[in-house]
Image: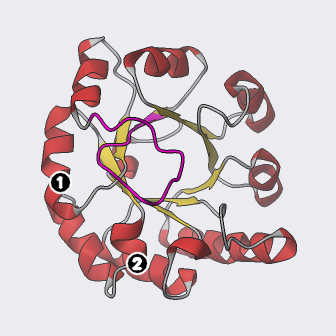
Amino acid sequence: MRIKREQLQLYLVMGSQNSFDEPAHVLKAAIEGGVTLFQFREKGEHAKKGAERKQLARQLQVICKQHGVPFIVNDDVELAIELDADGVHIGQDDGNPEEVRKNIGDKILGISTHSVEEAKAAVAQGADYIGVGPMYHTVTKADIEEVRGPIVIQEIRAAGISLPLVGIGGITSERITAIIEAGADGVALISAISKSENPKLVAEACAGKMFLR
């Protein structure tokens, strides 16, 4: 496997548009608190563009390398290749997964899914792990799918899919246990950490729910 299940336990997704503080400060604090994987997602209103976006990505990638945390790029295959990122995460509308796999080679490929059918397709398309959501209502994404909660993870596991699963969408530390009990290997958080006054403390609370050591 290109990624270990334990690396997916506490997954931070963030861009400058998600953070009240400097993204570098948030990322460092979150990693100190127990974050095990980071996805650079710089998109949407107020997101940085061009050279500024690339500069921020490099800055956050350096922090990840210093702490041994995989650095994943959301959607942008060209940027991931240019930075030699550890992998790419794509949604259902972010291009052909087979083409993405061909372009990134042995890098990590994560695919967002919302149903058993999409999860099965992701397995066939060469995903290394699957994001499942939204678990709960969230304001981070405007094009949110129907919220069905952790039961979707149960359905995916019941269908015989053993690939690592990560729950995402509206997750807080109080909601983690239900997601893990449903069969997820980890949880992905955005605002709960990135917009917190104390990202390290929030990450520690979440890590405690994951029984991280």
How crowded pointer 2 is (Cα within 10 Å; few <14, some 14-19, many 20+) is rated as some
Decide which of 20, 53 is in the foreground and name it: 20
Residue wearing tag 1? 175
User: Which circle marks residue 195 in the picture?
Assistant: 2
In the image, is residue 28 above or below residue 184?
below
Residue 192 in the image: x percent, y percent? 33, 69
Query: What percent of the width, then of the height, locates residue 66?
Result: 55, 74
Residue pictured at 16% horizontal, 64% vertical: 208
Q: Is residue 125 above or below residue 90?
A: above
At horizontal 40% and vertical 82% (from top left) the residue drawn is 29
Residue 213 in sight from this viewpoint: no
Q: Residue at x 59, y 31 (%)?
A: 92
- Residue 1: x and y in percent read 49, 32
Q: Name the kind of residue labelled 2 in the image.
A: Lys
Asked if residue 155 is positioned above or below residue 20 in the image, the reply reads above
Q: Secondary structure at mark 2?
A: loop
How far, Cα to Cα, is label 1 from label 2? 17 Å
- Residue 103 lies left or right of residue 43; in this view the side is right
Amino acid type, mark 1: Arg
Residue 148 vs residue 208, the one in the foreground: 148
Q: Helix, strand, or loop for circle 1?
A: helix
The x, y position of residue 2, in whole percent, is 53, 37
Prevailing secondary structure of the magenta residues: loop
Q: Quadrant of residue 41?
A: bottom right
Mark with earlier residue (1, 2): 1
Residue at left 38%, top 55%? Answer: 138
Residue 183, by quadrant, is: top left
Residue 68 belongs to the span the image colors magenta = no
**Splitting the image into 4 quarters, where does residue 119 fall?**
top left
Magenta-highlighted residues:
130-148
Is residue 146 shown in magenta? yes
Other residues around mark 1 within 10 Å, as few (<14) / some (14–19) / many (≥20):
some
